[in-house]
Image (spheres, rainbow, N blue to C red):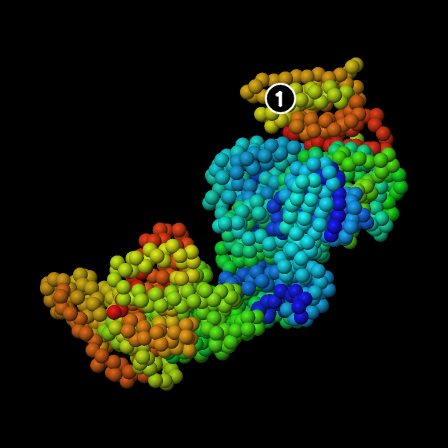
Amino acid sequence: MTDALYLRYRPQTFEDVVGQKHVAETLRNALRQDRIGHAYLFTGPRGTGKTSTARILAKAVNCLAEDVNDRPDNACPICTAINQGRLMDLIEIDAASNTSVDDVRSLIEKVAFAPSEARYKVYVIDEVHMLSTSAFNALLKTLEEPPAHVIFVLATTEPHKIPATILSRCQRFDFHRISTRQISEHLNEIARREGLTVTPEALGIIARSATGSMRDAISLLDQVAAYGHTEIDEELVRDVLGMVSGLAISEFVDALAGGDPAEVLTRLHELIDKGIELSQFVNQLIDQLRILLLLNVGKDPNLVDLPDSLLAKAQEQAARFTAPQLLHTIRALTEAGQALKTPFAGYLPVELALLDALNLDGMTAPGEKPVEKQVSKPASRPVSSPRPAPRPKKAPPKRTTGSVPPPSKPAAPIDAELAGVWKQLLRVMRGINAKLQAMLRSGEPAGIQGGKFYIRFKYEFHRNQVQAGIDDVNKGLSQVLGRPMEAVILGENDPLPTASVASQPDAASAPTPASDPDPNPDPNPDPASPLTDHPVVRRALDDWGGVLKPSSLVD
Amino acid sequence: MTDDFRIRVYGHAWAQDLLRRALQHGATRHAYLFAGPEHIGKTTLARAFAQALTCENLAGEDGLGACGRCRSCRLAAEGMHPDHRLFAPAGNQLRIDQIREVVREAALSPVESRYKVFIITEFERANVNAANALLKTLEEPSATTRIILVSHQPSGLLDTIISRCQLLRMRPLPESEVVRALQERLGLEEPDARRLARLSNGRIGRAFSLAEDPESWQSYNQRIQEMQAILAYSPAQRIAYAQALEKHKQLEIILQEWLLWWRDVLVIQNRGQALIVNQDHLDALTDLARSIPGPQIRRFVDAIMTTAAYLRKNVNRQLAMEALLLKAPHRE
Amino acid sequence: MRVSVLQENLAKGLSIVGRAVASRSTLPVLNNILLETEHSQLKLSAMDMEIAINCWVGAMVEEEGQITVPARLLSDFVNSLPKERIDMELNARTQTLHLRCAHYEANIKGIDANEFPIIPTYQGDMDAPSVEVEPAKLRSMIDQVAFAASKDDSRPTFTGVYTLLEGDRLTMVATDGFRLAVRSAILEEPAASNLGVIIPARALTELSRIISTVSLGEDDGVEVIFTQARNQIMFHLPGVDLVSQLIEANFPDYKKIIPTSYNTRAVLDTGEFLNAMKVADLFARDAARSVKVTMEPGDPGKVILTATSPELGDNVSEIDAMIEGEGMNATFNSKYMIDVLQIIDTPQVAFEAVSATRPGVFRPVGGSPEDEYVHVIMPMSPR
């Protein structure tokens, strides 16, 4: 058996095509009512069954079975000839290598010839969007008045590139991306027929990696099966795909939390030496950090889909990072993932991303970090592993990295954080003191540190007005932050009191301040400010396009 | 053994096992895609696989199982086998007429052996038209045809191509494998082999060509010296040097060397001495690590990568190199 | 190797094998010709990826040996020599061939003969299915069929000629999807087994050319050997072998395409039909080459060809014909009609049709009943 699995299991009837019921039913009805069109456009992502359906259609319209409901019967001489790829009246053309107007002209010239043995001559033009404009125009005339014996099936993954004039002359069928569940079920069936034992976890990984394409999924299964193991499990699939085990990822995250760059790089190279696929590893690491971020900001285990066995460890790890650290690391890794696509620098982009992530603190302006710690100090925190704060360890690199001016990037999440608190403050103030809220809107948040929230105003008038109602502002702040907070009013040019290094011991004396994870201290989120409004979460979502499940937000 | 014509493949043991098993069970696929970084031995594996496919007495248990003694194995090793067809980009791309040649010949029966094997290297250089022209053949070639696509940028391939192939994702070799290969094949001493292995980053082809070309090794050391000298150059001197460099044929390799060099400095600043590539320049690197602030180095590393990207996009090489050299850290 | 040959013989042999030298090849050795001494003859061989030719030239062999030398250089050099004896000697150490003829001398650097692919060579009893065909008959079969094969390499199946052996019948079939040519012949001795292979049309065209070049005796036949194990086919003539790779694919079920009956049948003069069609083609050229063919029963019946060009004008030709059955109107491609009428070698031709949308069929009239020829052309839908 040397044929690929996806060829062996290529659908032979309308019913075989997974996930495209709407197409199959419409085509079937058309057949029954003898209302076959002369031009079809099949659109949809790769591997969703466009070409297969076109072939099935070619069989169905030409099948010799008496009862139209039996067509295609895959038994008559016509069906057999198509299945063997030797029916002269089924002409498959890939538009991509026949893009010119001459190619289309020679095709059109031959369209006039009657079919040699079948009822209909079926032209399947794959990747039709590749045709040149003049080629489309040449095709247009034929599509307008096709000979009675001809059916065109145009297939494309990019329907937006098809001229409207062509679109309007075709019956269009949109093929849908196939769901992970449908793929996994179909794979399971193939595995059963092939006598392969595949664990559900392994099927899940394959189905997810296929991103909606059945052909990709079957090819992946095929690839894994090629190793000849009696049982295909998660580990084998990971090996084949060059993925790293969950445990190795978790250990790597521990190293990251430890904050020692040499240790992190050493581990990275250990993995590279084992032959992992770096881009897969980066994706897996990002996925894991994303989970930590959700736990970190959300405090709600329902936000992530993790079994209990892994949840505890993830929660513990989440507590060892701050949200900005996680965000920064994720962003750096995402960029590295892109950079890996050009082979020029090898593993270097990943090393740099990790070093950048670890040097975040060193690169942060002195005033910012303690603030972060203070803001995020929760009323009650989950117990996290007692360990020495890792940062003081970095003696040697500090000499060089310590002098780094604050780059704009890492500062951004902190500003966003501040802005988030500010926005919520304005919201709650409306209920407390509407007039004061109007005054507050003329100001802007300047910083938050040491239990103080600094607000800057340009005009004295506003300063005085707000100062007069400062108690109400404090009330609002504690409502937003869930702990006492004092508002301090600043003039336009008043400096923000520098958070002295002296404040750090204070911070360090608090249990694991550096890793305090909770920038959203409201244990019962105000329904008016759903979690998705939280700047950190919003930023996180923007960064990797994730979705927070609404259900998990409610509780 | 003087008449052993087996094509040796270093590393990639899992891939060799997989292919050998398929050969033993007569279960090889029509189409393969060997993907992975450059110079790690993808084409060598493809050639060894082709050799095994056409071997007259496939039996061996190591490598891919080719006997290495039959006429077919000899022709394969010499690159003279009439049923082995190697296609490489002509100039910058794989042209559609090359692919059409494959399509036409793939329909024909083999000349001498059981299989006709087509190896198409750097397949990412096939433009969309050429790649599509191969689709049908890739999907249903004749029973005696085997097609092996080789690519170091599988992300640049059409999905329809990838899913029609059995994909073997090949990775850089562990350093230890490269060291062993260099010792075995070229008889290098351990320290030399290790240095080259480090420098080549698991890219065995790169290690071999460095090792086999003493000049490249010498010029490498010289370029490293020059690069350190640049740090003290005035802007005018730097521009003069950029103009000299710009004419260098292998500018990308030079940039790669610089990149690894400065990466080493950064790594030392982060106390990763054990991980550096240029172990034999440890003192010079440490010295730089002490005297140049990390962020400066970090920015220069970025500039090198950006410049390399520019060069690939055919910008004015001289301007790009001048700009880069002006950004190099300064040291008296 | 030490061998002497006559310039004329060598030049002729080189021109025969020269057709198989690869023009562009990744294998340098295929740009060479293999010279090999064999039973007081010099064997010349060349091959590209599709075909290989062996040719034997009478020679005086003093020392056996073999070498490959660049085809182009050798041919050009030999063609420039006077018609005298050429002495050749191989320096085995340097793999250089020394040639001397009259006042000319040359050294040509070669490539070791071991690098040359193995070309099967005729060996008498080859233990493979084989048949013998009369050369002239084989040529006419090829000439009537091969042109109908497609020239489009993207569908390799159609670039070949399906060649079938069924008992004492040898059949060749070619189609490009729009026309189909089928020619069969009865063999003097039936084959031991039935089989079918697809031979690249080019290989047969070359074979036809070789048959017309070499001088053959009265009783000489072409032996056709199906070397199945190697997936090749060999044609053996006295002094020449042509070996072709086969196209490995499923050939369409061609019998289904040939209509089994007709409603109208016209018998007419082949030459007149051809001439009228050529005239019609002048006008059909920029109208997708479509020519309306009307068959009118009567006494005498008529075949009327109508071609209309939107820009050039129009043309009507009438040809007397014997019409059997009802009147009929169908449109056909003029080039395809001309192609087939040109190779029909009987004075009269029959043209049959079922309906305007079913294929039209050409058959020679009055030829040998053993040599059946059928040519099918798909009609075009009327404009």
Badge 1 is on which residue?
A: C282
In this picture, is A437 found above or below C234? below
Q: Name the quarter where the N terminus of chain A is drawn.
A: bottom right
- The 10 Å Cα crowd at callout 1, few under 14, some 14 to 19, many 20 or more, is some
Relative to B224, C53 lies left or right: right
Q: Which quarter of the picture shows residue C235?
A: top right
Q: In the orientation shown, which residue stands out farthest toward the top?
A: C299
Q: Name the quarter where the C terminus of chain A is drawn.
A: bottom left
Relative to B160, B296 lies left or right: left
Seen from the viewer's position, the closer of residues A473 and A10 is: A10
Picture coordinates of residue A26 (x, y %)? 59, 46
Q: Which quarter of the picture shows residue A342?
A: bottom left
Tag 1 subunit: C
In this picture, is B263 found above or below C361? below
Residue visible at 71% across and 63% down?
B70
Picture coordinates of residue B16 (x, y %)? 62, 67
Seen from the viewer's position, the closer of residues C76 and B249 is: C76
Residue visible at 61% across and 70% down?
A232
- Residue C234 appears in view: no
Picture coordinates of residue C334 (x, y %)? 66, 26
Q: Tell me the kind of residue under disc 1.
A: Leu
Seen from the viewer's position, the closer of residues B60 and B74 is: B74
In this picture, is A161 found above or below A270? above
Seen from the viewer's position, the closer of residues A206 and A249 is: A249
